[in-house]
Structures are given as C-alpha cells and as structure tokens.
Image (cartoon, helix red, strand yellow):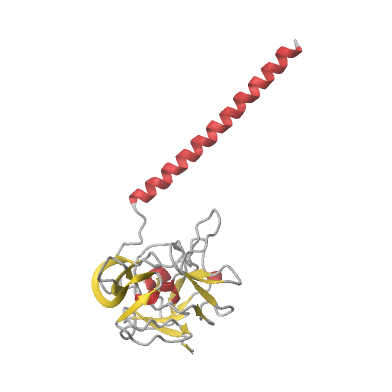
C-alpha cells in the first residue's frame, strides 16, 4: 500500500492508473478488462471528448474512460479500477471505507456524499463504522491537492470552518463564482478558494474537455420542487379542513342527541 497526502488534480495520472490517495494495490495497466457490473462484454480503455454518464456511480464524465464496443456501457476509469476498500484515506483516516456497488439507503432523506454534498445514486465508498460516504470521484481527492489552473497547493477546510450552506464567510469559488453546499479547498498561499465539487470536475474530465454547468440546478427541477411544495401545502390544508368538518359533524350530532 502507498499513501499520498497531496494529489495532482486536473493533469490526469498516467494511462490507466486510478490512483486514489490511499490504495491497497495499484492495478497494472491494461487496455481491456472484464467488470462485474458488465460481465457479458469486455470494456476497453479509451479517450473521448464527449460527455457520458458512468454506469457505476451515475455521475458525469468526459475524456478517459472504459467503454464497451458492443453496447453503450461506460465507466470512469477510477470506478472501473476501484479497489474493494481504501485504508486510512486522508479525508477519513479513522476507519477503512468499503466499496459498495450500489448506494446505501439513508431513510427518508436522500443519501449524499460527504465531500461534494451531491446525492449518491450509484456506487460509493462508505464507512461501515460511521455514516461517512463519498463518490469514487471524490475519493480521488485528498486533504491537499494541486490543480492545473492554480500554482499553489490547496488545502481542504474542516467542516467547522464552514457556514450552514457550506461556504466560509466572504468566500467566492474561483471556478463557479457562486455559493453552494459541500466541502471547500483554500489556497495555502493566497486567497484562492475552490469548491470540492468544482475540484472533482477536474478529476472526472469535465474541466479538461471544456464541459461546464452540468451540476447547476435545472429550471425543470426547480419547478418540480415548487410543485411538490404546493401539493404538500394543499394536502395539509385539505386534511385540516376535513378534520374541522368531521369535528363539526360530531358536535352537531352530540347536540342533537342531547336535545
């Protein structure tokens, strides 16, 4: 096992090496592999500029990937080569985190990644001791990173240094220029800040291939949320009204019997 406290992000690693900050065994370079999620065909390492959705983690990617030449099955290289477990990951060094091919349900609330705060819809790395979990793409990040668009090392801020919406006071992300939830990196030399979700776009190939805005909330999604809130309010009022009507009927019935 090797361990690395500072990982290079944006300038991708050598061909076919999914180098997590801590990895039990580095996979040997191979151009073609069989994957448990797609046993019917082999998948080949390739480099394409178009956007795709990883069949394992259900998140976007571009550039480097493993793809099936017989169907549309595609995986991030780091999802295809993900180890069964990560030991002493710099972001969560207290316990081992285990690879789960499917998301672990978190009850009524949506299960979310502890790093980027986005929902977990596919495979994840999850701690079996506590509730910590993260996307494989976020597991490629570390407590300190170097990115191609900034000359200095960036350090991951502790959760205690963030506000309720995830951003430190006076903070402006130099990539997305907006406020959002999730962890934040800060430059160790200057006032440069970067959302972890923006840093992961330098891992999954979106940034390198000029793809932006894929994680912005859509108008349709916003409209759906508003519509659901209206329905909930309407149902609440309806139930409340029915309750009052039933109460009035009972009062009238009692009064009639008493007279």
Q: Residue at (38%, 81%) from the top-left corner?
A: 18
Asked whether residue 111 is in view, the answer is yes
State the image coordinates of residue 62 (x, y, percent, origin top left): 29, 71
Q: Is residue 183 left or right of residue 48?
A: right
Asked whether residue 211 is in view, the answer is no
Q: Is residue 113 above or below residue 254?
A: below
State the image coordinates of residue 208 (x, y, percent, origin top left): 27, 74
User: Which residue of the protein is positioned furthest toward the right in this rendering?
Assistant: 258
In terms of depth relative to the viewer, which is nearer, 62 or 24? 24
User: Which residue of the protein is positioned furthest toward the bottom in this rendering?
Assistant: 2
Q: Residue at (42%, 87%) from the top-left corner?
A: 26
Quarter-wise, where is residue 43 in the image? bottom left
State the image coordinates of residue 104 (x, y, percent, origin top left): 52, 63
State the image coordinates of residue 146 (x, y, percent, origin top left): 38, 82
In terms of depth relative to the viewer, which is nearer, 83 or 32? 32
Q: Is residue 118 above or below residue 188?
A: above
Quadrant (top left/top right/bottom left/bottom right) for the C terminus: top right
Quarter-wise, where is residue 253 in the image? top right
User: Which residue of the protein is positioned furthest toward the left in this rendering?
Assistant: 49
Q: Residue at (65%, 25%) from the top-left corner?
A: 247
User: Which residue of the protein is positioned furthest toward the front in this rendering?
Assistant: 40
In terms of depth relative to the viewer, which is nearer, 50 or 219? 50
Q: Is residue 128 left or right of residue 175?
A: right
Q: Residue at (45%, 71%) from the top-left corner?
A: 184
Q: How many marks?
A: 0
Quarter-wise, where is residue 150 in the image? bottom left
């Amino acid at each position: 096992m090797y361990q690395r406290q500072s990982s290079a992000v944006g300038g991708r690693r050598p061909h076919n090496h999914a180098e997590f900050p801590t990895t039990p065994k580095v996979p040997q370079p191979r151009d073609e592999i069989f994957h448990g999620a797609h046993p019917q065909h082999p998948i080949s390492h390739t480099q394409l500029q178009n956007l795709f959705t990883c069949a394992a983690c259900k998140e976007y990617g571009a550039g480097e990937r493993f793809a099936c030449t017989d169907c549309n099955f595609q995986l991030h290289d780091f999802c295809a080569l993900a180890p069964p477990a990560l030991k002493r990951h710099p972001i969560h060094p207290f316990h081992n985190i285990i690879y789960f091919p499917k998301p672990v349900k978190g009850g009524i609330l949506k299960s979310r990644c502890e790093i980027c705060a986005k929902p977990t819809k596919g495979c994840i790395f999850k701690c079996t001791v506590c509730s910590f979990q993260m996307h494989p793409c976020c597991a490629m990040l570390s407590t300190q990173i170097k990115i191609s668009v900034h000359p200095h090392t960036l350090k991951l801020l502790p959760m205690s240094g963030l506000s309720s919406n995830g951003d430190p006071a006076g903070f402006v992300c130099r990539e997305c220029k907006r406020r959002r939830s999730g962890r934040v990196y800060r430059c160790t030399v200057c006032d440069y800040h970067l959302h972890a979700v923006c840093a992961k776009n330098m891992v999954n190939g979106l940034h390198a291939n000029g793809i932006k805005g894929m994680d912005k909330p859509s108008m349709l999604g916003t409209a759906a949320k508003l519509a659901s809130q209206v329905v909930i309010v309407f149902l609440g009022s309806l139930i409340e009204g029915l309750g009052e009507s039933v109460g009035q009927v009972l009062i009238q019935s009692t009064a009639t019997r008493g007279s």
